[in-house]
Amino acid sequence: MLCILLSYFLFLISYSLFLPSCSTLKQISRSANVLLNDSALVSGHVGINFFEPATNKIWFSHNSEKYFIPASNTKLFTLYAGLKYLPDSLPGINYYEFNDTTFIEPTGDPTFLHPDFTKQTVLNFLRSRKNIEINLPGFTDYVGKGWAWDDYKEGYMAQRSALPMYGNVLTLKKINNDSISIYPAFFSKYKTFVTSMQTGFSIEKSWDNNSFSLGNGTRQRADVPFRPNDSTIIGMLSDVLAKRIERTKAQINKKDFKVLYSEPADSLFKIMMHRSDNFFAEQILLMASNEKLGEMDDGKMINYLLQNEFKDLPQKPKWVDGSGLSRYNLFTPENFVYILNEMEKEFGMERMKSILPAGGKGTLENYYKSDSSFIYAKTGTLSNNLALSGYIFTRKNKFFIFSILVNNFPSGATPVRKAIEKFLQGIIRKY
């Protein structure tokens, strides 16, 4: 009789311990199903993965092993590459000094002459040198695979280069009916005027060179990518330094070069994630490639990561660029939960919190404002495709990693974002 009572008592204990878990699972599943049936998502394709590291348990999964276009969630994989292979301070340039000549090699650092960074250690160093010769690697992969052709004139699709300057965009601003400022002024010689400007200006630019024409239109400002070919790089550098820069013919052992560091790496990572900066993402992947492989080749770097650090991904992604501009990219929700979990373990939650946007910040500026300390996540948006992956801390001190990918919805992005916000806020406040 005692044995029967003891067994029954143990059963009650185990049942009581299991019951809350079972109840939570049902409640999260119920909330997720409400999201899946929301009118903004119901006609699209949706993948969700909700994971709790403390219990190593997946609380909800829907199409989480299937592939989606991730848009800027791709930057999470680029972020890992930067965190893993770039030092705490960014390599600004490599240099070697002999007699009165300084030989330099670019490293892909996007902070050089960029308005977001005012310190400009590399610029001050170069200005203090008498003669400068540059070794350029002949980089020509200016755009990524699958980038949209009709976006080439937009500032968010700045082209890549070995030695970026001014973010690889020229900025035009209307001053009056007859005048437009062009920055950097180096590009003023490439312009032509079609007609006078009354209310604003329009701009037409060639795809494969830096010539552009201005006419009457409505724009007051335009940020336009330029083609950062070798001749443009040398010309711009000569212009900004007010000295002639020569392309070196000297053969210098790479081991003889020193590194001049520019900015804290995390300051670049933070802007990339908060603004979802495509240009910074592309250059970070090139810099990581240069550090690890000795050359700026995003394709080789992606292959290396997939064969090494990412060999245990739940599904092998199709990964083609650093920014997520390409619709060739294909990832699964499980991929993003995996990489977020790895980054938290390897680099620490406090560092991840300092880099990722919180609620009400960055690309989450208009969302999760009342839950700013409970969510840290990366957005992703291309027309008819949306993604959100990150970390959630609930008001009852649970910690989840999640990924929600939505593709092929015909509506605008705002209703989808609001539906996801409602779902995640429910998780934060209930559990």
Image (tube, rainbow, N blue to C red):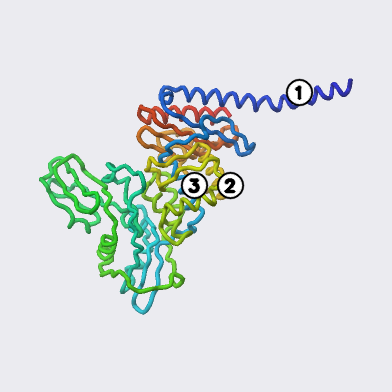
Tag 2 or tag 3, which sits nearer the N-term? 2
Between 208 and 339, the residue placed more toward the observer is 208
Between 252 and 217, the residue placed more toward the observer is 252
Q: Residue at x 32, y 45 (%)?
A: 156
Give me the C-alpha separation between circle 2 and circle 1: 36 Å
Q: In the rendered view, would you say 118 is above or below 259? A: above
- Dot 2 lies on which element? helix
Q: Which amino acid type corresponds to the residue marked 1 in the rendered image?
A: Leu
Q: Residues within 10 Å of mark 2 (few under 14, many from 20)?
A: few
Residue placed under numbered mark 1 in the picture? 12
Residue 243 place in picture, x, y as percent: 26, 69
Q: Quadrant of the N terminus?
A: top right
- Dot 1 lies on which element? helix
Give me the C-alpha separation between circle 3 and circle 2: 15 Å
Q: Residues within 10 Å of mark 3 (few under 14, many from 20)?
A: some
Between 250 and 264, the residue placed more toward the observer is 250
Tag 3 or tag 1, which sits nearer the N-term? 1
Circle on res. 354 = 3
Total marks shown come to: 3
Give the residue furthest to the top: 1
